Image (cartoon, rainbow, N blue to C red):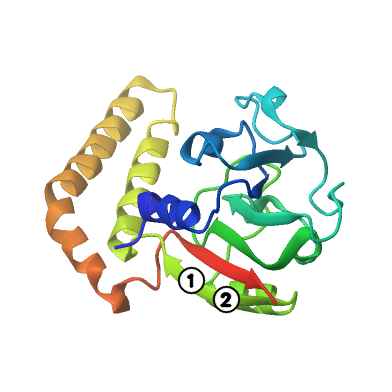
Amino acid sequence: MYYWSQFIQDINSSIQPGQTLLDAGAGNCHWKNYLPSTVKYIGIDLGIGDSDYDYSKLDIRCDLRDIPLADNSIDIIICIQVLEHLPEPCKVIAEFNRVLKPSGFLFISCPQAEPQHQIPYDFFRYTPFGLRSLLKSNNFDIVWIKPQLGNFHRLGEDLSYSARKLVTLSNQKIENFLYLTISYYLRLMWKIHKPMLLYFDKFESLQDNCTGHFLKAVKL
């Protein structure tokens, strides 16, 4: 099954020494640590949304709808877990196309189903069909779209998240103890059954309700 390690490997295999890579929505520039030292890295972000991020590492602070870079100046763009936070994603994808060189690559990861985060800057979730429509309407050709693991991984993440939220329901000692017990039980049951259930995620028919998707596209 396809996941983060393979995604980063595919990004790196598409990079040539000396090329310029734009990390769009870079946050604290975390992904720079996973890229070759030979790449010219540019991290850009609006610099809002997560109080835990150190935005001082950014090269450019800007709105992705208006990137202050020249046309056809970037070899590769990565946009990792950012698309859901953009109020006008179509305009951003159009900007990506503008700054990318012809035949330049765009790598995207984004959620199909994930808890709300970076509130209130959390706007959308994406199916593979929505991603294809968004990219093709902005002059990109889809190389591939791959699911982030499978349906049972998604089930486990949802169950774990909801179980943790249970303990926040009450300040009463008796209710707190009850909810904590139920929360522990749910997480324990998932831990016990997880190895068996995750086996089925290798089947393509059980990857349609996954957490999210990875995408590689090329500028036409």
Callout 1 touching callout 2 (CB < 8 Å): yes
| Residue 89 visible within the image | no
Residue 142: give its label. Answer: 2
Give SS at disc 1.
strand
Residue at screen point 48% across, 63% down: 213
Residue 207 vertical placement versus 18 (above, below): below
Q: Position of residue 24 (x, y in %)?
A: 68, 47
Residue at screen point 69% across, 36% down: 49
Pair 1/2: label in front? 2
Give SS at disc 2.
strand
Residue 69: give its label. Answer: none
Residue 151 vertical placement versus 52 (above, below): below
Left or right of 195, for residue 16: right
Amino acid at the residue labelled 1: Ile
Q: Position of residue 164 (x, y in %)?
A: 37, 36
Q: CA distance from mark 1 to mark 2?
A: 7 Å
Left or right of 197, for residue 134: right
Q: Nearer the viewer, residue 219 or 29?
A: 219
Q: Quadrant of the N terminus?
A: bottom left
Residue at numbered disc 1: 145
Q: Residue furthest front?
A: 17
Residue at screen point 73% across, 77% down: 139
Amino acid at the residue labelled 2: Ile
Q: Position of residue 59 (x, y in %)?
A: 74, 33
Q: Position of residue 158 (x, y in %)?
A: 38, 51
Q: Quadrant of residue 96?
A: bottom right
